[in-house]
Amino acid sequence: MTRDPSSLVDALLRAILYLRISDLTDTSTSIPRQEKAGRNKADDIRATVIKVLKDEDRSGFHTYVSRPGWDSALDMLRNRLADVLIVFKVDRATRQGIPQASEIIRIVYDTGCRFISIADGIDSNNEGWELQLMLAAHQAHRESKNTATRVTDLRADERDEGRWMGSRPYGFLVTPDRKLEPDPAEAQIIREVVAKLLDPDEPSTLRGVARWLNEQGHDSPRWASRKARIAQLEARGDQRRADKLREKPIKTPNSWSWPTVRQLVTSPVMTGYLPHKGEVYRHSVTGDMVRVGPEIISMHDYARLRALFGGRVPVHWTRPSTGARSSESKRPVTGLLVDFLHCGECGARESHDSYWVRNDKPWPRYRCNRRHFSGRCPGTLMKGDIADRLVTEAMLSRLSALDDDDPAATALAERWADYRHPDRANQRRDLEALIREEDQFLSRLEDEKLDGLFQGVRGEARFRQRYDASQAKLTSYEAQLAAIPMDVRLDLTPFKEPTLFEEAWEAYDLAERRDVLGLVLHRAWLFKARTSGVKPSLDRFKFWWVGEEEPTGIGAALTLEP
């Protein structure tokens, strides 16, 4: 019996199957069903499946989403490594509309390959298939746009209600009404991480914290969520789904990395507020910051973490240049004036070189960093113990000369109160952060009104409602701030009596001395001596004391790049 020559040709066809699913869950069966239908179709046309390409958890609508499986399928057709591309439905191949459908048509025209969509009945061997493909691609694109519009509206409404719509965030449990409540064990881990990062004596780095978490054996956020989900399914008696989820592989290892730690501590959800695009979400009508649950990190600590590790900082925070570590390098300091002392010639920081040897004897010194690294400054230099003594004497003279009603004395008293009562200082800083946030929000509202975003009677009413609500909160925060005791009448006698101060100063260690110096001094500048061979003296220093305006023009004698 002689076979039909066309059947011999069909038997030589090389087919590739393309499978896609946007949201791969632990119970989805779409991928196996697509593959089964594709293999049946390949058998019908007497083709051999040489490759199965998949894109799981990949959108076919968004152009910014990469789809390696789809790109590989098209490349195989362009290079004539396959004869037939089979998809279950056009919307599995693309939801980007006519432009990508045109790409498929061009490849079929250029290579002579065959395109088949099973559910749509499209086969490039049939007449008019191009029009069918265009219509199916356009319909798939419109469906995705309509779905995106509905989902966007739904999510905006859910955000206004303060409901959590994503997967469980690390540190929290999602309640049945889509609110968050702290998970006791994970919340404690987060607090320990924050304490390490903000430790005033020995602050850890992000890498150091990630290393500590791995050494302690704590599950990473993704693995912790997986285990919590499995335990939840088993508690409900759904063992089949629990076993299936347990067998599903995770692409990442169960380990912490520094980006994971950074993302964790800089997320607004840690403060109990609903995050949106990396910032605290505000109600679309009232403009209020929307809460989604209790806080794990205080607003003050969150602002400090954002200042250290985040991008744009929603509230201002400046790390104090005091303590046993440098505010810039975070390394242990060996000199009293590190972070305080700058070069008066170029403005660069002065580093403390504690290992310098002169005439076979240790000779710790302060030196200009720019001079040391690039030579682009005349440089300033002074022996460490002499500079420390001169600045201490200047600080003592400054304190002794202050009158009780001097604004500088009030500023010193406020700093001393913060030093003695850190809880009040944190409360005040939290309120100041909220006040700055409301100020920024009011400025944005005013700009939007000037840009014409609140038009008509309804627009004006909406603007007024949001503006008045924010003003009321601002007034409330300011009243709470004014009610905090400032203790400006604290007894500053130990600071103003030379004998008492010297006795206390001798008993302080380096970190305590730097703390006290930070109460009085913002910054000091060291200038070169007018002639060589003269003894170091106080007239080589310029000081910016607390309560005074910042000096200008210092370091401007040289035009240097920073």
Image: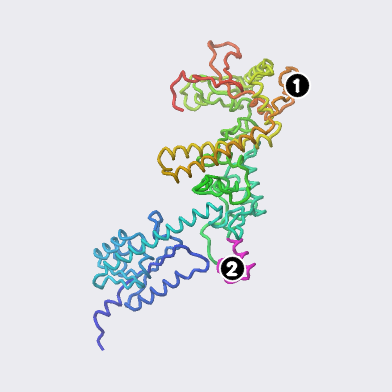
Q: 167 above or below 125?
A: above
What x and y, as percent, mark residue 17? 37, 69
How many numbered discs sit on the rendered protein?
2
Q: Nearer the viewer, mark 2 or mark 1?
A: 2
* Most distant residue in the bottom direction: 1
Quadrant for residue 133, please give it: bottom left
Q: Which mark is residue 33?
A: none
Q: Tell me the SS state at disc 1.
A: helix
What x and y, as percent, mark residue 517? 65, 25
Q: What residue range appears in magenta? A: 226-245
Pointer 2 residue: 242
**Direction from residue 218 to residue 373 in the image, left or right:** left
Q: 82 above or below 305?
A: below
Pointer 1 residue: 503
Q: Tell me the SS state at disc 2.
A: helix
Q: Residue at x 68, y 33 (%)?
A: 484
